[in-house]
Image: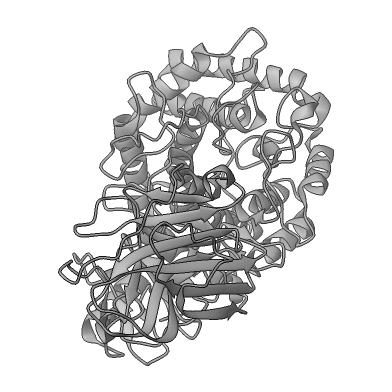
Amino acid sequence: MRVRSALLSMSILTALLATVPSASASVAPYDGQASHSVALFSVKKPNNTAVQEFITNDSHLDRVSLYIGSAAGSGTITVSVRAVPAGATPAPANATTTIATKTLTIDSTLADQGWLEVPLDAAIVPGQKYYLFAEAASNQAISWSGVTTPVLGSLSSWNYDATYYGRQGGWNQEKTYRLAFYVNPSDSERCGSWAEKCYHAVATGLVRNSTTTAQASGSRYVDHSNVLARQDGTWSYLPTGATAAVSVAANDPGALTQIAESKAWLDSGKIPGAGPQRDAAERALLSMRALTQPNGAVAAAWGNGYYEYSWPRDSSFISAAFAATGHDVEAYQILKFNATTQSSYGTWEARYNFDTSMVRDGRHWQLDANGWVPWSAYQWYQAAPQDTRMARLTDIYPMIKKAADYTAAHLDANGLPPASPDYWELASAPTANISTAAPLLAGLNAAAELATQLQRSDDATRYTAAARQLSDGIAKFFAPNGYMRSPDPKYGHDSAATFMAPPFNAAPADLAPALDSTYTALRKSNGGLLPGDGPEHSWGDATWTPSTSFFALAWYGTGQTARADGVLDWVLAHRNALGELPEQVTSGGSPSAMAPLAWTDSLVLMSLLAKDGTPLPTPPSSK
């Protein structure tokens, strides 16, 4: 839900293409950079091009591979190799120095990421410097991935954007970033680490936590597992304790052992839904488990460096879903991780590395976590085994107390929290917003109930009073405009109006028409929803599966089952070819951005539980 796609452009720095001399034959070849931890350049059209220098000892160019991510259901990408003469500024439209070129059509409904192999046929000079270009024409961006850390012996990457860098010729030399590519990849290098045919469109799937794989559309998961059966008949999985997936023959004993373990884990809990919806719930559970690290950190998604962190917000939802489906160990591990990352003030930063250190990227801390974490602790407690839950609640109660104390102490005279970045993750927030106020209300009510369970009557009284104060503030300043993003209507609607509904808060009497108007305002032609429609942020054409799923959960919680069913069906109909739930759906209806997204997985599971008649409990209201 966060504004991560925009971060692709943050790697673009201003510089001018300098004189480009040919390398001598004595220079070591640099014709393969396989690592792809982050999407570096957004390649949207011929006016936006990514380039990687390379030197090879080969005398003939047979093929090249690039690690790309596509947010487009259709379009073309042109890959070319050029020898750029000294002193030239090679605008993409001027291809007079092209050695070889190939234009490929991306015609699948898939929109994910992986190695794109391009056949080329040209004589080249060993030891000379060449330039691998990628230009795209599509409705959505194609990004070329690489690494932001130094690579021994590497040559420069370049970015061309005529509009953005027009006064400098449109070119920018990257001093650190290196794009992922192969020139004449060997069999062991093709499609990354697997000797198999490359596909123009690929679907992203998880093998296990810390490993993601891009697989051809003919691949599938072996039932009840994260073991991938590939189109060539082999299997891929991550052995216990390993850091890289291995390719094995079908029915390999090690893979079968892992499948049996995954099935036993699923059977130890509850899988909501029936038929295809049950299958979707199983995949969501397995994906959430794969994204959950051994210490309880939860990767929001995998395969893109901007997502491979633990957000307190996202992880709270995953913890709640694990608790509700009977996976107590994972739910509590997540709570323990969040306890280790809480500041001495009782707040949380936007996101954390898996070792509990904060991510220093300039993002402001986000107050809504002070509501989400206590709410998730309440969800865990309600589902936890009764013989151990009191002792374990006592262990994490200091976290709950610090969070609720901070919230209670920072409500203003109107009963509202301060302006704070929220799930939109904008750099600033002009006013108090519903997407912070509603979670904080849920968190205060949850903290009051947990304090009562531990016989902390003073704490319970204080949190109940603060919850009433906040509830009154919401009723006075948010309810009159239909629970829009801000008390000031100019900031528009927010899908977080749903946070005023179960299982977060007892729905106020006037919530139903507010949800109706919000849904209508945010719904796009593809059937999905935007997070908001105010002036703070332009969301583009793609819709967001978390915001859409919010309404399924809210309408189940308020008894509008038919409407909830329709929203849930839409979300489930837009999974990728491997059955993973994506973050976004393009205007044309294709799954887009990261898949799986753990937050959407958790929301779908909660919705299916509510549909089955076993909804998550709502913290008792202070009213």
Residue 512: % across, % down: 81, 40
* Residue for point 60% across, 74% down: 76
Work out whether 44 lies above or below 65: above
Residue at image point 40% right, 81% down: 222
Residue 564 placed where, x, y %? 73, 56
State the residue in front, 315 or 540: 540
Q: Which residue, as the protein is rendered here, is positioned at the far top?
A: 413
Left or right: 171 with respect to 110?
A: left
> Residue at 49% of width from left, 86% of height from top?
218
Residue 206 visible within the image: no
Q: Quadrant of the C terminus?
A: top right
Answer with the quarter of the image where residue 251 lies: bottom left
- Is 518 placed left or right of 546 in the picture? right
Q: Is residue 6 above or below residue 437?
A: below
Residue 182 place in picture, x, y as percent:
32, 74
**20 left or right, relative to 446:** left
Q: Is residue 303 above or below residue 391?
A: below
